[in-house]
Image (spheres, grey):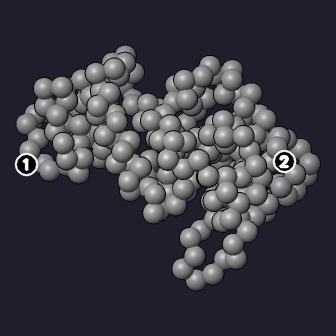
Amino acid sequence: MTLVPDRSTLTDPMEPPTYTDADLIGRSGDSPDLFAALFDRHAPTLHRYVTRRLGPHVADDLVGQTFLVAFERRERYDPARPDARAWLYGIATNLMRRHLRDEARQLDALARAAAGPGAVPCPAEGIASRVDAGAAARRVGALLAGLPARERDVLLLYAWADLDLDEIGRALDIPAGTVRSRLYRARKRLRPALAGPGTYQTEETMRNG
């Protein structure tokens, strides 16, 4: 199957935007090329998320792998869920864990690297701007590198992928209460790197700050 859509091969005239993600996944059993529309909808934002976490050199391959795995598992998808975003981010998270176990070392190296022309932006800068506009990006990056992987996954799915607590729970296959506690612990660990008054931020401030 070709994940980059070729409109001349789409066999169903009622192809999106009328179809939900669940419709596309279900109908791809008979018309596999419809799965390319799912790629159209979610690959750009997923690619940005993976790039922020692992860098552009990894993102292309990992996003492609994500949709290949999703295509292979499409018969297992719950048709009661019209939006497949959490499902796709869950697959991507598992692939990131499997293929780049040294993410923490990369984050630490990027946080320490001096900024310069043409340098790859430090992921810490993104999380710092989302958590608090005055946060020190390098210190946040170092703390991100030291977070337990399970807390880092929850934090970045929330702050960078814009998933809500229920979606993160579905993505990682954990209860929403566990998501909330991991997010709380991650934010607490990051608190020393945040500039400004020494108060905890609300979840909304953390996402949009």
Above or below 200: residue 103: below
* Crowd around label 2: few <14 · some 14–19 · many ≥20 (10 Å): some
In the rendered structure, the answer to whether residue 23 lies left or right of residue 175 reads left
Q: Secondary structure at mark 2?
A: helix
Q: Which residue is mark 1?
A: 8
Amino acid marked by disc 1:
Ser
| Residue at the far right in the pictured view | 198
Please identify the quarter of the rendering in which residue 60 is found: bottom left
Front residue of 125/101: it is 101
Amino acid marked by disc 2:
Arg
Please identify the quarter of the rendering in which residue 77 is found: top left
Q: Position of residue 56 (x, y in %)?
A: 47, 62
Residue at 13% across, 26% down: 30
Residue at 13% across, 31% down: 31
* Residue 191 badge: 2
Front residue of 60/103: it is 103
Count of labels in the image: 2
| Residue at the far bottom in the pictured view | 117
Q: Position of residue 86 (x, y in %)?
A: 47, 32
